[in-house]
Amino acid sequence: MKAHAIIDAKLSRKEQECLLNHSVDNVDQCFAEERGARANLGALGIIYSLPVPTKHKKTRQRVLSDPNKAIPKIKTKVLRIGSKLSGNNSWREALPWDIGPQRYLPNFYTYYAFLNESEKLLYRKGNIVYLHVPKSGGTTMAKCFKSMTKKLKRYSHFYGPIGENGINAVMEQLKTQNDTKLQIFSGEYAFYLCDLLGGKPCSYFLMLREPYDRLVSSYSFCKRHSDDGNNFYCSLNANNLTITEWALIQKSFFFRQLIMNEGMCQGHYDDEIDLNALMNIHKGVIKDKLPCWMKVQAILDSKLSKKEQEGLLKFIVDSIEQWFAGVGVLEKMPETLEALNIIYGLPVYPTCSKIHANKAPSKSKKEDEKVKERLMRELKSDPRVREALLPDLHLYKRVEQIVKSQSAARKHVLTGGN
């Protein structure tokens, strides 16, 4: 059933007006006046965020008369109340930290019709944070933005890679600077950084890679670079693991990046898990210290039931469009670069399309392809691997959908909404 059909079937006109006309703080009062709205919203199971109130009565009526315009506004109405109404949110109480950033700008393309001119400019006047998903074109993007900041007068610095202790290091560095120019940040641990950057607007963007393909790439990379010191994705000795073992230990990387808490890397939650037991389980596999992502996975597995993890995943899948100003997939990198051009008004495509990083040795490409095909067959034939990758598979599917929506909205954006 289409979204507008579900809304029309579940909510009265008055209930829809409650969502369109009231801020997050006041919407409860409107619900109280219109009995049953809360129960109906719970049945919908919709997660809302970013209130976008419509000020004038005529505009409100026009929006309500057009389902394609009404639904995005209704869907943008409340991360907070939506989480209470959707039913399966016990994960919030079980986890020792909050999930979801507080400061962000929504998808520029899919929200374009609902942004006024000053709001559209926020994307170009604010700081930019690139969430680097390992083996998903991230090194290329980082090199690209580093190159651009050297040429662009309105951007002063590129910060990256932001690793385990990177956020604290960046914040300390920013304290000593009086520079009022904009900044670009990049790293595996960069999500939630906007919450710490005061003043200017701040937005996130990301690029994903098909999860099975990304897994094979990371495994092959870490086998070739066994001495790599990156504690994020080469913290395990790939030469001591089969591709299936690698997958079952690492599970869904991107999913964890979206719920990663910076305090995890400083040991703030070490009392929530048995560190010695974790080290013993993976003895001979962990190169050095226990990586932060492994601690996060241990807490998820110990604190949340399968149903609660599914509820958390649904919340994140439903929130991607609001949290990220732009998204892309590696398989369509040129399209992603062009999309970023428009969002930020930066020469992303001409700069990044010339940069190629992290390429595997090309002396035997045919042999490499045969190895990749064998590894992919091994992974896809094992249902345990699919279960381990399920969160990232769902997130990748959602990002693909958003990429299609961005593409469909491109002409509308380029013509200024005309």
Image (cartoon, grey):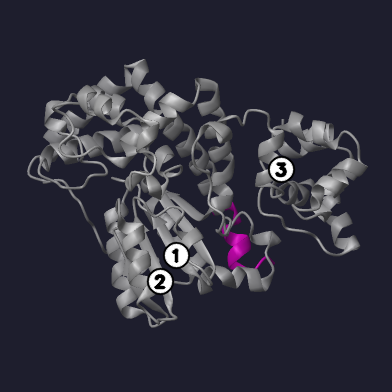
Q: Nearer the viewer, residue 338 or 49?
A: 49
Of label 2 and label 1, which has the lower sequence position?
Answer: 1
Left/right of residue 32 with respect to residue 376 in the rendered view: right
The image quadrant where one finds the N terminus is: top right
Q: Which badge, 2 or 3, comes first in the chain's sequence?
A: 3
* Amino acid tagged 1: Ile
Q: Which mark is residue 81?
A: 3
Q: Is residue 328 visible?
A: yes
Extreme residue in the front direction: 271
Is residue 405 visible to the viewer in this orientation of the structure? no
Magenta stretch, residue numbers? 407-418
Q: Position of residue 155 (x, y in %)?
A: 40, 77
Q: Position of residue 88 (x, y in %)?
A: 63, 28
Q: Quick one: label 1, few (<14), some, or many (20+) residues within 10 Å?
A: many
At mark 1, the secondary structure is: strand
**Tags 2 and 1 in contact by the CB under 8 Å rule?**
yes
Distance Cα–Cα, label 2 vs label 3: 33 Å
Amino acid tagged 3: Ile
> Few, some or many C-alpha atoms within 10 Å of disc 2 (few <14, some 14-19, many ≥20)?
some
**Is residue 398 found left or right of 152 in the rendered image?**
right
Q: Residue 183, which numbered label?
A: 2
Which disc, if any, is residue 128? Answer: 1
Left or right of 155 on screen, residue 242 = left
Q: Amino acid at mark 2?
A: Gln
Quadrant in which the C terminus appears = bottom right
Tag 3 near tag 1, CB within 8 Å: no
Which residue sits at x=41%, y=39%?
256
Residue 143 position (above or below residue 392): below
